[in-house]
Image (cartoon, rainbow, N blue to C red):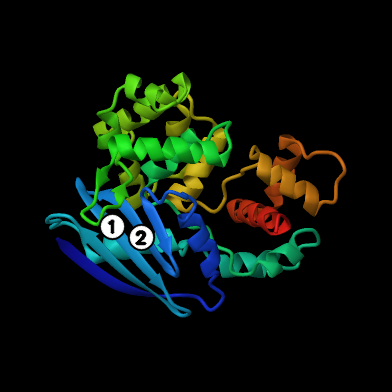
Amino acid sequence: MTRLECVIPLPGNYRHADVLAFHGRDAQSTAELVHGQCIHKGIVLQGCAAVVEIGLDDAEARCSLLIDGPAATASMADFDALARRLLGLRMDVAAFESCHGEHPELGALILAQSGLRVPMAATPFEALTWAVTGQQINVGVASQLRRRLILLGGRQHSSGLWCHPDAQGVAQLNEAQLREAKFSVAKTQTILAISRLASGGQLPLDDWMAVPLAVPAMEAALLAIKGVGPWTVNYTLLRGFGHADGSLHGDVAVRNALQRVLAQADKVSAAQAEAWLRQFAPWRSLVAAHLWASLRFAEG
């Protein structure tokens, strides 16, 4: 087994509970396990099963990477970047709060939720397949589908935790397997297309993560895939690439939260949400995150 370790300082206003909740969404802990202040996440890394362990203290995160088998090209820099993705430390939250903390409609919410960050998926491929899986269904059903995809295409780490599959693992599946796992015909075809494009190099998601293209170029490449629309693209850019300025105006939860913020009797349309969010560029994704979080708070 290969083992790497690093320690990452945390900002003074770091919201530990948010990150623990994000990585603990799967009640069955198939590929993620949250125990106390510790996160365990299974990933396929360079073809090997691996687990990231992150222990959170008040001021720092103690991170370990446990890889089944040799991984000569796994560097400390890559591991540090991966841990920071999972911890939501990629965006300049302080600059956003300084700019919009006194906004007449959203300022009070931003300050009440100061330090809110957006934890990311381990890879853009994970973010994209999750976005497709969650289209038009609730989170509970989407989580069940995700769990089945992990068991079909992933690998099991020596610790017992399953690892979210990489593109190669999903590309080896067929339509019958995904349909039996209760994926719709459309989602089956989209996920297989994404996986085969990514594993074949025509959709170089990992390269984009290392050396990002201009956002319009990434958007165009993703939108060219049948079954991938604007919401899926913006969610993928947020959770997969840490893009802070995606407009998630098509998200129902964002619009519901915005209706509360504006104290509006009528539902907020996608067009109205898009126009309202435009004033927050280049941090529209962070605004969406604050709106999502406000709903969790309102529900107790």
Near mark 1 (Cα within 10 A), the count class, few <14, some 14-19 or many ≥20, is many
Decide if residue 13 is on the left or right side of residue 40. Answer: right
Query: Label 1 belongs to which residue?
Result: 51
Q: In the rendered image, is residue 40 in sight? A: yes
Answer yes or no: do the residues labelled 1 and 2 have beta carbons within 8 Å? yes
Mark pair 1, 2: CA separation:
6 Å
Decide if residue 114 is on the left or right side of residue 119. Answer: right
| Location of residue 279 with respect to 57 vertically, above or below | above
Q: Residue at x 36, y 67 (%)?
A: 54
Near mark 2 (Cα within 10 A), the count class, few <14, some 14-19 or many ≥20, is many
Residue 226 place in picture, x, y as percent: 46, 23
Q: Amino acid at mark 2?
A: His
Q: Amino acid at mark 1?
A: Val
Residue 114 place in picture, x, y as percent: 64, 69
Q: Residue 40 got which mark?
A: 2
Q: Is 44 or 196 nearer to us in this picture?
A: 44
Looking at the figure, which quarter contains the C terminus?
bottom right
Q: Residue at x 75, y 48 (%)?
A: 258
How many marks on residues?
2
Q: Residue at x 66, y 55 (%)?
A: 296
Q: Is 83 or 75 nearer to us in this picture?
A: 83
Residue 24 place in picture, x, y as percent: 47, 56
Q: Quadrant of residue 251?
A: top right
